[in-house]
Image (cartoon, rainbow, N blue to C red):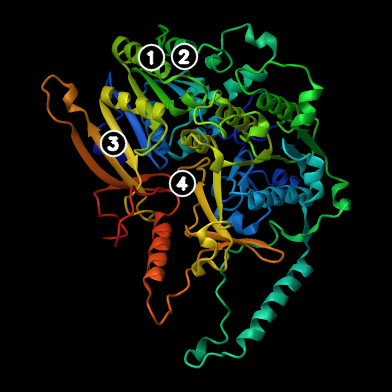
Amino acid sequence: MFTELNELLDASPQRPETGKFTLLRDTRTDGSFLVHHFLSFYLRAGCKVCFVALLQSFSHYNIVAQKLGVSLTAAKERGQLVFLEGLKSCLDLLFGEEEKQSGQPSPLQFISESTSNLKALFDFVRTSLTPAGSDSWKGPVLLVDDLSVLLSLGATPVAVLDFIHYCRVTVCYQLKGNIVVLVHSNEDSEDEENELIVNSLCHHSDLILWVEGLATGFCKDVHGQIKIIRRASLELTAEQDLVQIYQYKIQDKNVTFFARGLSAAVL
Amino acid sequence: MAAAPAAGGAARGRGATSFQRKAAAGSRLAAVAGTRPSVRHGQLLLSSGLPSLDCVLGGGVAVGTLLLIEEDKYGLYSNLLFKYFLAEGVVCGHDLFVASAKEHPDNILKELPAPLLDDTYRNERGEEATAVKSEDFQDSMKIAWRYQNLPKVEASPTTSTKFGHYYDVSKTMSPELFQSIKWHSFYLPEELSLQPKMKTHNMNSAYSRLLQSIQRIIYQEGFDGSDPQKKLKNILRIGIQSLGSMLWGDDICSSDTPEYIHSLTKFLYVLRGLLRKSLSACIITVPAHLIQNKAIMERVTNLSDMVVGLESFIGSERETNPLYKDYHGLVHVQQIPRLNSLICDVSDTKDLAFRLKRKLFTIERLHLPPDLSDTVSRTSKQDLAESAKLLSSGCGAMAIGKKHLDF
């Protein structure tokens, strides 16, 4: 986890919040460093994490998490982390032998069937995050790396929104946990289905971290800007959303955040 | 907390999808020919066949990744890059898998460019250098004479020639080099007539056949480490030509609202899974300029690791533009992956152009010539402004801004 981001978000692993839906949104840049941050943050906080990793392999996240000080293999062994590797699961579904398929249905079975609802995926999330009784983890967390991939695999936008809605009800309200989801968006994008999902999720999230490139183009010292939007308008007091903008630079083991125009190269 | 990354793929068995960190064991590294480890992320890197493209991609094509080439308008230069990738595989001794719906893979492999061995390459560069020198001798520098003897600035990014080879486009590769190479082919018209109907998983039947074929080769030849007996590891280079075009049975290039809009993206997702769990790398050329629905190209870009777009000047007004007289087209690097790390190796030069000289194809930094005209005409000023707009839009590898700002 990045300590500077924790300070900006006023979050600490000792007291993780409950019932929050965080949306990670990136525009024309790669926001996956935030996924690594939240993964190591919640593992450090002692929460039970269900990570639906649709785009990269397990060892990719493992190697980056080790740089941030957390071991994913150890977390998996002690039952704190349930890792759904989308690529492996999809291969098992399409090329697996018949005996394997007679067991539990694959979470990604919507790919090969004509029904485009994500019920199997939701069942997987629910069974992995429901506390088993002997668990002593603090609170369940659902982490989804790249919801936009589900659209590429054939799910309709309504099915994706239904899935997120069911997850919110189960994880945020019933189990008092948190959800963190990464989506890609682009203001002048032609992918209307994706924009539909992103707009809908923006309205429902408690915290939006929006990562964009600099308006002036590529820079070696400042890799982009991050907008932190706290949705105070969702509270009953009906205040306005609080928007803060910072710039960041990604390094090998850390990401530094600073106020606009005050990067280390300038000072 | 000492969970070291899993060593080697031998004991893993089918179904283990992972990048395998090969940084520690030196003996395993030396076993695979034609590769070198990356300093950044510990993966093995392959050469794409074009050393200047390797530089742009951050050292080379990592094993387990997908290189997507957005074809130029007539497919000439993307075909060249495709052949370079395969030719590099032949020279390094890798296995090849060539899939095409247009040309028979046998014909593609017959037309690979011949490699330039070290001394012939030096002679080529020497010839060109002497040709240039004889022109320059007349105008030796009068004012900046101290700079006369300094070496000229290298326009193209250079790498050491041990990794990656140069190829002569005017000659074809001799058949002797093929003798030790194992290659597999997938020619769609033959495959459709051979096998009966198979399960398609809601995907275009041509794509699902191709996936079955790739998966069968990876499993049978042991590229996924499922066969612990195989000591000698080799790389499988997969090349798929013109994916998404109508010849593959896909209608995304011919209609605005295609029927099977998810076929190509599903194919790429499953292919990504297959690549990640095996010692292979893949090059795909896609006729992006024909795809009407731009949403599909955005999704395709998200699902690929490296995306390079080629834009040739043939038939456009830039062909006769004096600003671009040395070049044949532009190179747009749309995406570079971050593998096993938070950062990626992105090159500093964002404005790249390519040119096909008599024998060599190179990717170079785009230099605009200085505006030395005595009479400053309106048209030339406009051209410069247009090209300046092009330059500042940059590449999307790290992050690009929303709009062009005039400084």
Would you identify the image quadrant in which residue B16 lies?
A: top right
Percent x, y of residue B218: 73, 30
Q: What residue type is disc 2 on? A: Leu
Q: Is there a contact, CB below 8 Å, between mark 1 and mark 4?
A: no
Percent x, y of residue B136: 61, 85
Would you identify the image quadrant in which residue B264 lies?
A: top right
Q: Is there a contact, CB below 8 Å, between mark 1 and mark 2?
A: yes
Q: At 57% across and 71% down in the image, what residue appears?
A: B154
Query: For mark 3, does the 10 Å Cα neighbourhood hold few (<14), some (14 to 19), or many (20 or more) residues?
Result: some
Task: Measure the alpha-carbon separation of dots 4 and 3.
Answer: 20 Å
Callout 4: helix, strand or loop?
loop
Q: Which residue is mark 2?
A: A118
Q: Which residue is mark 4?
A: B343
Task: Measure the alpha-carbon separation of dots 1 and 4.
Answer: 34 Å
**Residue farthest bottom in this picture:** B142
Q: At 65% across and 28% down in the image, what residue appears?
A: B249
Q: Which residue is mark 1?
A: A162
Q: Tell how many labels.
A: 4
* Closest to the observer, B162 or B239: B239
Percent x, y of residue B73: 59, 49
Task: Measure the alpha-carbon separation of dots 1 and 3.
Answer: 31 Å
Subunit ID for the residue under disc 3: A
Task: Measure the alpha-carbon separation of dots 1 and 2.
Answer: 8 Å
Q: At 70% across and 14% down in the image, what residue appears?
A: A97
Q: Which mark, residue B85?
A: none
Q: What residue type is disc 3 on? A: Asn
Identify the mark nearer the N-term, 1 or 2: 2
Callout 2: helix, strand or loop?
loop
